[in-house]
Image (cartoon, rainbow, N blue to C red):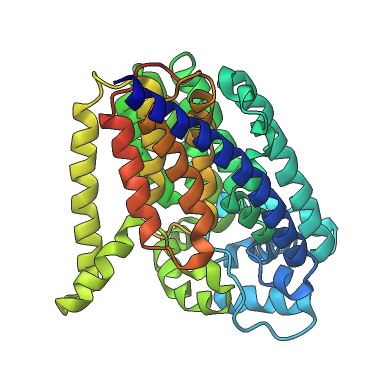
Amino acid sequence: MKRAFGRVDIFLTIFKVLITTEVLVLTFVWILLFASMVLDKKYIERSDFFAFYTAGLMVRSGEIKKIYDIPTQLKYQSQILGKEAKSYPLFRYLPFAAPVFYPFTFFNFYEAFFLLLVVNVILIIFMIIISKKTFKNLTRFKLWFLLPFSYYPIILTLVKGQVSIFLALSLLLIYRLLSKRPLIAGILFSFLLIKPHFFLAGLPFFFLITKDKKNFLLGVFLASLFLFLLSVTLVGFKELLLFPFYTLSSEVNLRGIAPEVIVNVDLFLIFTPIVRYLSQSPWYTYLYGLTLYLIVLLIYAKKLNTVSYKYLYFSAVIFLVIFSYHTYPYDYALLLVPLMGLFGQAFGRKKTSLTLSILVILLLIFPNVQLMGSSLLNPLMLLTTAFFLLFGKHKTEIG
Protein backbone atom coordinates (compact mmCIF):
# COMPACT_ATOMS: atom_id res chain seq x y z
CA MET A 1 0.00 0.00 0.00
CA LYS A 2 2.82 2.39 0.88
CA ARG A 3 4.48 1.65 -2.45
CA ALA A 4 1.24 2.53 -4.24
CA PHE A 5 1.02 5.86 -2.44
CA GLY A 6 4.70 6.43 -3.15
CA ARG A 7 4.10 5.93 -6.85
CA VAL A 8 1.22 8.40 -6.72
CA ASP A 9 3.44 10.98 -5.01
CA ILE A 10 6.10 10.49 -7.67
CA PHE A 11 3.49 10.92 -10.38
CA LEU A 12 2.19 14.12 -8.80
CA THR A 13 5.72 15.52 -8.49
CA ILE A 14 6.34 14.78 -12.15
CA PHE A 15 2.95 16.32 -12.98
CA LYS A 16 3.83 19.60 -11.28
CA VAL A 17 7.23 19.75 -12.99
CA LEU A 18 5.69 19.04 -16.39
CA ILE A 19 2.91 21.61 -15.94
CA THR A 20 5.40 24.26 -14.85
CA THR A 21 7.60 23.49 -17.84
CA GLU A 22 4.62 23.52 -20.17
CA VAL A 23 3.43 26.93 -18.97
CA LEU A 24 6.91 28.36 -19.58
CA VAL A 25 7.26 26.81 -23.02
CA LEU A 26 3.73 27.69 -24.15
CA THR A 27 4.09 31.28 -22.96
CA PHE A 28 7.24 31.62 -25.06
CA VAL A 29 5.68 29.95 -28.12
CA TRP A 30 2.41 31.88 -28.01
CA ILE A 31 4.17 35.23 -27.53
CA LEU A 32 6.27 34.50 -30.62
CA LEU A 33 3.13 33.56 -32.55
CA PHE A 34 1.38 36.66 -31.25
CA ALA A 35 4.25 38.92 -32.38
CA SER A 36 4.34 37.39 -35.86
CA MET A 37 0.59 37.90 -36.29
CA VAL A 38 0.21 41.45 -35.01
CA LEU A 39 3.14 42.59 -37.12
CA ASP A 40 1.38 41.29 -40.23
CA LYS A 41 -0.73 44.08 -41.69
CA LYS A 42 -2.82 41.66 -43.76
CA TYR A 43 -3.64 39.58 -40.69
CA ILE A 44 -4.85 42.68 -38.85
CA GLU A 45 -7.14 43.46 -41.79
CA ARG A 46 -8.63 39.96 -41.48
CA SER A 47 -9.16 40.28 -37.74
CA ASP A 48 -12.63 40.45 -36.21
CA PHE A 49 -11.82 43.94 -35.03
CA PHE A 50 -12.17 45.06 -38.64
CA ALA A 51 -15.91 44.31 -38.34
CA PHE A 52 -16.12 46.11 -34.97
CA TYR A 53 -14.31 49.15 -36.34
CA THR A 54 -16.69 49.19 -39.32
CA ALA A 55 -19.68 49.21 -36.95
CA GLY A 56 -18.17 52.04 -34.92
CA LEU A 57 -17.62 54.02 -38.09
CA MET A 58 -21.25 53.50 -39.11
CA VAL A 59 -22.34 54.81 -35.71
CA ARG A 60 -20.14 57.87 -36.16
CA SER A 61 -21.48 58.46 -39.69
CA GLY A 62 -25.11 58.15 -38.60
CA GLU A 63 -25.78 55.00 -40.64
CA ILE A 64 -26.18 52.60 -37.74
CA LYS A 65 -29.69 51.71 -38.97
CA LYS A 66 -28.05 49.96 -41.93
CA ILE A 67 -25.77 47.89 -39.70
CA TYR A 68 -27.21 44.62 -41.04
CA ASP A 69 -27.00 45.66 -44.68
CA ILE A 70 -24.01 43.76 -46.05
CA PRO A 71 -23.36 46.06 -49.07
CA THR A 72 -23.27 49.07 -46.71
CA GLN A 73 -20.77 47.35 -44.43
CA LEU A 74 -18.61 46.43 -47.43
CA LYS A 75 -18.76 50.06 -48.60
CA TYR A 76 -17.33 51.27 -45.30
CA GLN A 77 -14.74 48.51 -45.25
CA SER A 78 -13.59 49.53 -48.73
CA GLN A 79 -13.19 53.09 -47.46
CA ILE A 80 -11.09 51.88 -44.53
CA LEU A 81 -8.83 49.72 -46.70
CA GLY A 82 -8.66 52.06 -49.67
CA LYS A 83 -9.54 49.12 -51.91
CA GLU A 84 -12.55 46.93 -52.66
CA ALA A 85 -13.61 44.72 -49.73
CA LYS A 86 -15.19 41.42 -50.79
CA SER A 87 -14.88 38.75 -48.13
CA TYR A 88 -13.89 40.37 -44.85
CA PRO A 89 -15.39 39.79 -41.38
CA LEU A 90 -18.81 41.34 -40.96
CA PHE A 91 -20.34 42.83 -37.81
CA ARG A 92 -22.60 40.05 -36.51
CA TYR A 93 -23.47 41.26 -33.00
CA LEU A 94 -26.60 42.88 -31.61
CA PRO A 95 -26.80 46.66 -32.25
CA PHE A 96 -26.04 47.73 -28.65
CA ALA A 97 -22.45 46.52 -29.11
CA ALA A 98 -21.71 48.88 -32.02
CA PRO A 99 -21.42 52.17 -30.02
CA VAL A 100 -18.76 50.55 -27.82
CA PHE A 101 -16.37 50.79 -30.77
CA TYR A 102 -17.29 54.37 -31.65
CA PRO A 103 -14.34 55.90 -29.68
CA PHE A 104 -11.88 53.76 -31.66
CA THR A 105 -12.89 55.49 -34.89
CA PHE A 106 -11.05 58.65 -33.82
CA PHE A 107 -7.89 56.71 -34.67
CA ASN A 108 -7.04 55.10 -37.99
CA PHE A 109 -7.84 51.40 -38.22
CA TYR A 110 -4.34 50.10 -37.46
CA GLU A 111 -3.86 52.44 -34.49
CA ALA A 112 -7.30 51.46 -33.20
CA PHE A 113 -6.39 47.76 -33.42
CA PHE A 114 -3.39 48.27 -31.16
CA LEU A 115 -5.48 50.43 -28.82
CA LEU A 116 -7.92 47.53 -28.37
CA LEU A 117 -4.93 45.27 -27.87
CA VAL A 118 -3.81 47.45 -24.96
CA VAL A 119 -7.35 47.43 -23.52
CA ASN A 120 -7.45 43.63 -23.68
CA VAL A 121 -4.06 43.33 -21.98
CA ILE A 122 -5.32 45.62 -19.19
CA LEU A 123 -8.38 43.36 -18.81
CA ILE A 124 -6.04 40.35 -18.52
CA ILE A 125 -4.13 42.13 -15.77
CA PHE A 126 -7.42 42.78 -13.96
CA MET A 127 -8.25 39.08 -14.29
CA ILE A 128 -4.87 38.12 -12.84
CA ILE A 129 -5.32 40.46 -9.85
CA ILE A 130 -8.91 39.37 -9.17
CA SER A 131 -7.99 35.68 -9.59
CA LYS A 132 -5.26 36.10 -6.97
CA LYS A 133 -7.85 37.40 -4.50
CA THR A 134 -10.48 34.84 -5.51
CA PHE A 135 -8.40 31.64 -5.62
CA LYS A 136 -6.18 32.11 -2.58
CA ASN A 137 -3.93 29.11 -3.21
CA LEU A 138 -3.29 30.08 -6.82
CA THR A 139 -0.07 31.91 -5.97
CA ARG A 140 1.47 28.66 -4.71
CA PHE A 141 1.98 27.86 -8.36
CA LYS A 142 5.14 29.88 -9.03
CA LEU A 143 4.12 30.90 -12.55
CA TRP A 144 0.45 31.60 -11.83
CA PHE A 145 0.61 35.07 -13.42
CA LEU A 146 1.69 33.52 -16.74
CA LEU A 147 -1.33 31.25 -17.06
CA PRO A 148 -3.32 33.61 -19.33
CA PHE A 149 -0.34 34.07 -21.63
CA SER A 150 0.26 30.32 -21.89
CA TYR A 151 -3.31 29.79 -23.01
CA TYR A 152 -3.79 29.82 -26.79
CA PRO A 153 -7.43 31.05 -26.75
CA ILE A 154 -6.30 34.19 -24.90
CA ILE A 155 -3.54 34.87 -27.41
CA LEU A 156 -5.93 34.26 -30.30
CA THR A 157 -8.43 36.68 -28.73
CA LEU A 158 -5.72 39.33 -28.67
CA VAL A 159 -4.68 38.90 -32.30
CA LYS A 160 -8.28 38.65 -33.57
CA GLY A 161 -9.33 41.80 -31.66
CA GLN A 162 -12.15 39.83 -30.03
CA VAL A 163 -14.17 40.49 -26.85
CA SER A 164 -13.79 37.07 -25.19
CA ILE A 165 -11.42 38.41 -22.52
CA PHE A 166 -14.07 40.91 -21.42
CA LEU A 167 -16.61 38.07 -21.18
CA ALA A 168 -14.13 35.95 -19.21
CA LEU A 169 -13.63 38.82 -16.76
CA SER A 170 -17.42 39.12 -16.43
CA LEU A 171 -17.69 35.40 -15.58
CA LEU A 172 -14.96 35.76 -12.96
CA LEU A 173 -16.83 38.66 -11.34
CA ILE A 174 -20.10 36.70 -11.47
CA TYR A 175 -18.34 33.84 -9.66
CA ARG A 176 -17.50 36.23 -6.82
CA LEU A 177 -20.89 37.98 -6.70
CA LEU A 178 -23.47 35.29 -7.45
CA SER A 179 -24.09 34.31 -3.80
CA LYS A 180 -23.76 37.72 -2.15
CA ARG A 181 -24.85 40.15 -4.89
CA PRO A 182 -27.16 38.16 -7.20
CA LEU A 183 -28.73 41.29 -8.70
CA ILE A 184 -25.35 42.61 -9.85
CA ALA A 185 -24.37 39.10 -10.99
CA GLY A 186 -27.51 39.00 -13.13
CA ILE A 187 -26.63 42.35 -14.70
CA LEU A 188 -23.12 41.11 -15.47
CA PHE A 189 -24.50 37.88 -16.93
CA SER A 190 -26.51 39.96 -19.42
CA PHE A 191 -23.23 41.13 -20.95
CA LEU A 192 -23.16 37.68 -22.55
CA LEU A 193 -25.84 39.01 -24.90
CA ILE A 194 -22.89 40.35 -26.85
CA LYS A 195 -22.83 36.73 -28.00
CA PRO A 196 -26.47 35.61 -27.60
CA HIS A 197 -25.65 31.91 -28.00
CA PHE A 198 -23.59 32.06 -24.79
CA PHE A 199 -26.41 33.83 -22.99
CA LEU A 200 -28.99 31.24 -24.05
CA ALA A 201 -26.81 28.21 -23.37
CA GLY A 202 -25.60 29.43 -19.99
CA LEU A 203 -28.73 30.95 -18.42
CA PRO A 204 -30.39 27.66 -17.28
CA PHE A 205 -27.18 26.47 -15.57
CA PHE A 206 -26.55 29.78 -13.82
CA PHE A 207 -30.19 29.99 -12.78
CA LEU A 208 -29.96 26.54 -11.17
CA ILE A 209 -26.88 27.32 -9.07
CA THR A 210 -28.18 30.70 -7.90
CA LYS A 211 -29.71 30.62 -4.42
CA ASP A 212 -31.44 33.97 -4.75
CA LYS A 213 -33.05 33.24 -8.10
CA LYS A 214 -35.48 36.16 -7.90
CA ASN A 215 -32.80 38.86 -7.68
CA PHE A 216 -30.56 37.13 -10.21
CA LEU A 217 -33.39 37.01 -12.76
CA LEU A 218 -34.31 40.60 -11.92
CA GLY A 219 -30.77 41.69 -12.75
CA VAL A 220 -30.82 39.68 -15.98
CA PHE A 221 -34.22 41.10 -16.93
CA LEU A 222 -33.41 44.76 -16.20
CA ALA A 223 -30.06 44.68 -18.02
CA SER A 224 -31.46 42.70 -20.96
CA LEU A 225 -34.39 45.10 -21.25
CA PHE A 226 -32.03 48.08 -21.27
CA LEU A 227 -29.86 46.50 -24.00
CA PHE A 228 -32.96 45.58 -26.01
CA LEU A 229 -34.36 49.11 -25.83
CA LEU A 230 -30.95 50.53 -26.72
CA SER A 231 -30.79 48.24 -29.76
CA VAL A 232 -34.31 49.26 -30.84
CA THR A 233 -33.39 52.92 -30.43
CA LEU A 234 -30.29 52.45 -32.57
CA VAL A 235 -31.71 50.50 -35.52
CA GLY A 236 -35.48 50.24 -35.07
CA PHE A 237 -37.61 47.22 -34.20
CA LYS A 238 -38.01 45.93 -37.77
CA GLU A 239 -34.26 45.99 -38.41
CA LEU A 240 -33.61 44.23 -35.11
CA LEU A 241 -35.96 41.41 -36.15
CA LEU A 242 -33.70 40.83 -39.15
CA PHE A 243 -30.73 39.98 -36.92
CA PRO A 244 -31.19 36.15 -36.89
CA PHE A 245 -31.68 36.01 -40.69
CA TYR A 246 -28.77 38.36 -41.26
CA THR A 247 -26.54 36.19 -39.09
CA LEU A 248 -27.35 33.12 -41.15
CA SER A 249 -26.98 34.87 -44.50
CA SER A 250 -23.63 36.39 -43.54
CA GLU A 251 -22.16 32.94 -42.83
CA VAL A 252 -20.87 32.78 -46.39
CA ASN A 253 -18.52 35.67 -45.65
CA LEU A 254 -16.63 33.54 -43.11
CA ARG A 255 -14.64 32.05 -45.98
CA GLY A 256 -12.49 35.15 -45.95
CA ILE A 257 -11.49 34.74 -42.32
CA ALA A 258 -8.30 33.02 -41.17
CA PRO A 259 -8.71 29.19 -41.26
CA GLU A 260 -8.17 28.60 -37.54
CA VAL A 261 -11.29 30.60 -36.74
CA ILE A 262 -13.60 28.96 -39.26
CA VAL A 263 -13.58 25.68 -37.35
CA ASN A 264 -16.24 25.39 -34.70
CA VAL A 265 -15.25 23.80 -31.40
CA ASP A 266 -18.66 23.08 -29.88
CA LEU A 267 -20.48 19.81 -29.21
CA PHE A 268 -22.83 20.29 -32.16
CA LEU A 269 -19.83 19.44 -34.32
CA ILE A 270 -19.84 15.79 -33.25
CA PHE A 271 -23.29 15.26 -34.78
CA THR A 272 -22.37 16.61 -38.22
CA PRO A 273 -20.78 13.38 -39.54
CA ILE A 274 -23.71 11.36 -38.12
CA VAL A 275 -26.25 13.57 -39.91
CA ARG A 276 -24.28 13.32 -43.16
CA TYR A 277 -23.93 9.54 -42.87
CA LEU A 278 -27.68 9.16 -42.36
CA SER A 279 -28.37 11.66 -45.18
CA GLN A 280 -30.52 13.73 -42.85
CA SER A 281 -31.33 17.42 -42.96
CA PRO A 282 -28.70 19.70 -41.33
CA TRP A 283 -31.43 20.71 -38.86
CA TYR A 284 -31.00 17.32 -37.20
CA THR A 285 -27.62 18.57 -35.96
CA TYR A 286 -29.48 21.14 -33.85
CA LEU A 287 -32.01 18.54 -32.73
CA TYR A 288 -29.38 16.07 -31.54
CA GLY A 289 -27.35 18.83 -29.90
CA LEU A 290 -30.41 20.19 -28.09
CA THR A 291 -31.32 16.69 -26.89
CA LEU A 292 -27.84 16.19 -25.44
CA TYR A 293 -28.02 19.66 -23.87
CA LEU A 294 -31.29 18.84 -22.09
CA ILE A 295 -29.91 15.51 -20.84
CA VAL A 296 -26.82 17.25 -19.42
CA LEU A 297 -28.99 19.97 -17.86
CA LEU A 298 -31.11 17.29 -16.14
CA ILE A 299 -27.98 15.56 -14.80
CA TYR A 300 -26.65 18.92 -13.63
CA ALA A 301 -29.89 19.69 -11.78
CA LYS A 302 -29.69 16.37 -9.92
CA LYS A 303 -26.15 17.15 -8.71
CA LEU A 304 -27.00 20.54 -7.20
CA ASN A 305 -27.21 19.26 -3.62
CA THR A 306 -24.16 16.98 -3.76
CA VAL A 307 -21.52 19.13 -5.49
CA SER A 308 -19.92 22.31 -4.14
CA TYR A 309 -20.80 25.69 -5.64
CA LYS A 310 -17.29 26.05 -7.03
CA TYR A 311 -17.37 22.85 -9.04
CA LEU A 312 -20.92 23.55 -10.15
CA TYR A 313 -19.87 26.98 -11.38
CA PHE A 314 -16.81 25.72 -13.23
CA SER A 315 -18.80 22.97 -14.95
CA ALA A 316 -21.50 25.54 -15.84
CA VAL A 317 -18.90 27.67 -17.61
CA ILE A 318 -17.67 24.64 -19.54
CA PHE A 319 -21.23 23.69 -20.56
CA LEU A 320 -21.88 27.30 -21.59
CA VAL A 321 -18.92 27.16 -23.97
CA ILE A 322 -19.34 23.71 -25.51
CA PHE A 323 -23.12 23.91 -25.94
CA SER A 324 -23.07 27.31 -27.63
CA TYR A 325 -23.53 26.82 -31.34
CA HIS A 326 -20.72 28.55 -33.23
CA THR A 327 -18.13 28.44 -30.50
CA TYR A 328 -14.76 29.37 -31.97
CA PRO A 329 -11.24 28.72 -30.61
CA TYR A 330 -10.93 32.21 -29.11
CA ASP A 331 -14.19 31.65 -27.19
CA TYR A 332 -12.35 29.06 -25.08
CA ALA A 333 -10.84 32.10 -23.36
CA LEU A 334 -13.88 31.92 -21.06
CA LEU A 335 -12.44 28.68 -19.66
CA LEU A 336 -9.63 30.67 -18.06
CA VAL A 337 -11.92 31.05 -15.01
CA PRO A 338 -12.18 27.31 -14.16
CA LEU A 339 -8.56 26.82 -15.23
CA MET A 340 -7.28 29.37 -12.69
CA GLY A 341 -9.54 27.90 -10.01
CA LEU A 342 -8.35 24.35 -10.57
CA PHE A 343 -4.71 25.46 -10.57
CA GLY A 344 -5.41 27.08 -7.22
CA GLN A 345 -6.34 23.74 -5.76
CA ALA A 346 -3.85 21.57 -7.63
CA PHE A 347 -0.92 23.57 -6.29
CA GLY A 348 -2.51 24.52 -2.98
CA ARG A 349 -2.03 21.10 -1.40
CA LYS A 350 1.01 18.96 -0.76
CA LYS A 351 -0.84 15.91 -2.06
CA THR A 352 -3.06 16.57 -5.03
CA SER A 353 -5.52 13.92 -6.18
CA LEU A 354 -5.01 12.17 -9.49
CA THR A 355 -8.47 13.32 -10.57
CA LEU A 356 -7.59 16.96 -10.02
CA SER A 357 -4.34 16.49 -11.91
CA ILE A 358 -6.27 15.08 -14.85
CA LEU A 359 -8.70 18.03 -14.77
CA VAL A 360 -5.87 20.55 -14.94
CA ILE A 361 -4.24 18.64 -17.78
CA LEU A 362 -7.50 18.46 -19.76
CA LEU A 363 -8.27 22.16 -19.31
CA LEU A 364 -4.76 23.35 -20.12
CA ILE A 365 -3.70 20.91 -22.82
CA PHE A 366 -6.62 20.50 -25.19
CA PRO A 367 -7.55 24.16 -25.80
CA ASN A 368 -3.83 24.69 -26.48
CA VAL A 369 -3.70 22.14 -29.32
CA GLN A 370 -6.44 23.61 -31.47
CA LEU A 371 -3.86 24.35 -34.12
CA MET A 372 -3.44 20.59 -34.59
CA GLY A 373 -6.90 19.77 -35.90
CA SER A 374 -8.42 18.73 -32.58
CA SER A 375 -11.70 20.60 -33.11
CA LEU A 376 -13.75 17.44 -32.53
CA LEU A 377 -11.67 16.19 -29.62
CA ASN A 378 -11.76 19.48 -27.71
CA PRO A 379 -15.48 19.65 -26.83
CA LEU A 380 -15.53 15.93 -25.98
CA MET A 381 -12.60 16.30 -23.59
CA LEU A 382 -14.18 19.38 -22.03
CA LEU A 383 -17.44 17.48 -21.56
CA THR A 384 -15.38 14.80 -19.79
CA THR A 385 -13.78 17.49 -17.63
CA ALA A 386 -17.18 18.87 -16.61
CA PHE A 387 -18.40 15.40 -15.64
CA PHE A 388 -15.22 14.89 -13.60
CA LEU A 389 -16.17 18.02 -11.69
CA LEU A 390 -19.72 16.78 -11.11
CA PHE A 391 -19.03 13.13 -10.30
CA GLY A 392 -15.46 13.08 -8.96
CA LYS A 393 -14.75 12.55 -5.28
CA HIS A 394 -13.25 15.89 -4.29
CA LYS A 395 -12.00 16.10 -0.74
CA THR A 396 -11.41 19.81 -0.46
CA GLU A 397 -12.73 23.09 -1.69
CA ILE A 398 -10.88 25.24 -4.14
CA GLY A 399 -8.94 27.96 -2.45
State the image quarter where residue 357 is shown. Answer: top left
Task: Using the image as rendered, state which of residue 210 and residue 231 is in the foreground.
Answer: 210
Task: Using the image as rendered, state which of residue 52 and residue 337 is in the foreground.
Answer: 337
State the image quarter where residue 270 is shown. Answer: bottom left
Q: Can residue 222 be seen by looking at this rendering?
A: no
- Give the percent coordinates (x, y) of residue 198: 42, 47
Residue at the image point whose x is 46% and y is 42% from the top: 361
Q: Which quadrant does the N terminus fall into?
A: top left
- Give the percent coordinates (x, y) of residue 242: 43, 65
Q: Can residue 396 be seen by looking at this rendering?
A: yes
User: In the displayed image of the protein, which residue is found farthest to the left?
Assistant: 278
101 vs 297, left or right, is right
Q: Is residue 75 above or below residue 227?
A: below
Residue at the image point whose x is 23% and y is 26% from the top: 303
- Give the percent coordinates (x, y) of residue 256: 57, 78
Task: Using the image as rendered, state which of residue 85 and residue 110 is in the foreground.
Answer: 110
Number of numbered discs on residues: 0
Q: Is residue 96 above or below residue 109?
A: above
State the image quarter where residue 340 is shown. Answer: top right
Residue at the image point whose x is 31% and y is 44% from the top: 384
366 vs 33, left or right, is left
- Give the percent coordinates (x, y) of residue 147: 62, 39
User: In the displayed image of the protein, which residue is found farthest to the front?
Assistant: 3
317 vs 84, left or right, is left
Residue at the image point whose x is 30% and y is 60% from the top: 268
Task: Using the image as rendered, state which of residue 151 and residue 100 is in the foreground.
Answer: 151
